[in-house]
């Protein structure tokens, strides 16, 4: 937005609790509406809104209210977690293009969201770097031309570690992602490789390619952001710097390509691009995601709900790193599948996953 002021007009913005950043952005972009979700930050949010002459919205409902109220060409859904679902559905209902970073939206309710988008003829443009790479490589090609989608994964901070050493890892160690600078929740998801499982489910929905034709390969340099193998054996890869600026620009400017001052990639300096198989023993969450996708229906919402709570509990020091996978395993085992769920049943499944993860005893596995 800052770099291309003539192309964008920001009509509404939100934060959970970073009101300092909200103040800076609201003062700069003068939006019509601002939303603050966290109850502890709402009073300050209301003051900021009044100071910049914007309408104030609050709580998770406030996000959907803003999408319903203001006219926009594009809604960027970059909240973290299940909270992104309702604003996304509202944008689709209003026929507004959605730029989607929040992967939990398609993980939990992919069938409903994609059906609504198809019905309203709304575009979902992927910001997630892997999906943005696939989007660029596919360039409108349909699923019938595709043999495999290949998602690259850095392997996270614990790549190559012996599974038994993972019980003792701390949140700080797990947050230290080797190649991408990201929020706390996705950084932990990357450390467990649940992030790649979510991306597989997200890709299946976005591109209509079933999970059994989506593979994950570890690529520690993160230079190739993902690949499409076509039925004739030709493989297209999208490469670039590990900077979210690039997929965000691609989506916000799409279909235009606009110069941005980035230095060209120096291949000689990169030296080599390497690939490995993921380790299923050390990182069971990836297999849990494939399992949830295969069972379908409400299972991915349970998977996600359990993961959200387990990650928050790990970050709070309540359970160990391996307790995250254990919480998800318990939640999936306890769940009775509902195929073809309604929105209400997805909300119930999300709650069931959360409750199951909350029920895991503090101190579990580390
Ligand atoms: N970061 C990346 O490089 C990256 C790449 C690809 C995909 N994604 C996906 O994009 C989404 C956002 O990731 P992120 O790393 O950008 O996360 P983040 O920095 O932790 O949070 C993104 C935004 O969501 C807000 N938020 C957090 N919890 C919320 C809640 N309960 N209600 C309303 N708003 C809430 C945050 O508020 P505050 O302003 O208070 O922090 C922040 O504005 C995730 O689904 C992630 O998987 C991220």
Image: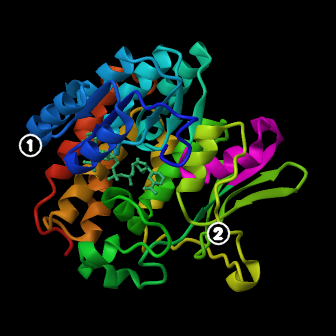
Q: Is residue 1 left or right of residue 319?
A: right
Residue 144 among magenta residues: yes
- Left-right relation of 306 to 239: left
Mark 2 CB near ligand 1 (8 Å cut): no
In front: 207, or 250? 250
Tell me the tag on residue 223. Answer: 2
Q: Is residue 191 magenta?
A: no
Task: Determine the secondary structure under disc 1.
Answer: helix
Q: Bin the neighbour count of mark 2 within 10 Å (Cα to Cα): few under 14, some 14-19, many 20 and up.
A: many
Q: Nearer the viewer, residue 38 or 173?
A: 38
Query: Image point 34% across, 45% down: which residue?
Result: 80
Residue range corresponding to the magenta coloring: 127-149
Q: Is residue 57 above or below residue 69?
A: below
* Mark with earlier residue (2, 1): 1
Q: Position of residue 219 (x, y in %)?
A: 62, 72
> Mark 1 Cα within 10 Å, few/some/many (few <14, many 20+)?
few
Q: Which residue is mark 1?
A: 40
What distance separates the C-alpha of mark 2 from that of mark 1? 40 Å
Residue at the image point whose x is 35% and y is 26% from the top:
86
Residue at left offset 35%, top offset 15%: 69
What colouring does the structure picture have?
rainbow
Quarter of the figure with the C terminus: bottom left
Write down the quadrant of residue 238 in the picture. Answer: bottom right
Dot 2: element: loop
**Could you tell me residue 361's position as x and y percent?**
11, 60
Question: Most extreme residue toward the right, as rendered?
Answer: 232
Q: Which mark is residue 314?
A: none
**Residue 68 location, quadrant:** top left
């Amino acid at each position: 937005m800052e770099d291309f002021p003539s192309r964008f007009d920001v009509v509404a913005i939100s934060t959970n609790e970073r009101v300092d950043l909200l103040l800076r952005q609201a003062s700069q972009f003068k939006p019509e509406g601002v939303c603050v979700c966290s109850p502890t930050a709402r009073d300050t949010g209301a003051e900021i809104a009044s100071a910049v002459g914007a309408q104030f919205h609050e709580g998770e409902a406030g996000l959907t209210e803003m999408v319903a109220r203001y006219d926009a060409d594009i809604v960027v859904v970059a909240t973290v977690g299940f909270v992104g679902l309702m604003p996304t559905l509202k944008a689709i209902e209003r026929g507004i293009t959605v730029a989607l970073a929040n992967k939990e939206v398609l993980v939990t309710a992919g069938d409903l969201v994609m059906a609504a988008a198809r019905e309203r003829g709304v575009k979902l443009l992927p910001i997630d770097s892997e999906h943005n790479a696939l989007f660029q490589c596919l360039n409108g090609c349909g699923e019938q031309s595709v043999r495999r989608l290949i998602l690259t994964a850095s392997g996270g901070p614990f790549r190559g570690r012996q599974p038994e050493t993972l019980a003792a890892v701390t949140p700080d160690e797990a947050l230290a992602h080797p190649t991408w600078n990201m929020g706390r929740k996705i950084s932990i998801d990357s450390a467990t490789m649940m992030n790649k499982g979510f991306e597989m489910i997200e890709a299946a929905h976005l591109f209509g390619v079933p999970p059994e034709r989506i593979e994950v390969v570890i690529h520690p340099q993160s230079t190739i952001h993902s690949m499409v193998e076509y039925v004739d054996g030709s493989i297209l890869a999208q490469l670039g710097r590990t900077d979210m600026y690039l997929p965000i620009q691609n989506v916000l400017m799409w279909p235009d390509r606009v110069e941005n001052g980035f230095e060209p990639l120096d291949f000689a300096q990169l030296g080599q691009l390497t690939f490995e198989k993921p380790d299923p023993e050390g990182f069971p969450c990836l297999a849990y995601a494939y399992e949830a996708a295969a069972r379908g229906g409400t299972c991915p919402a349970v998977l996600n709900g359990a993961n959200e709570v387990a990650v928050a509990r790990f970050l709070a020091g309540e359970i160990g790193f391996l307790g995250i996978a254990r919480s998800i395993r318990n939640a999936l085992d306890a769940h009775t599948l509902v195929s073809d769920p309604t929105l209400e049943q997805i909300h119930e499944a999300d709650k069931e996953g959360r409750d199951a993860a909350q029920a895991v005893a503090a101190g579990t596995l580390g």
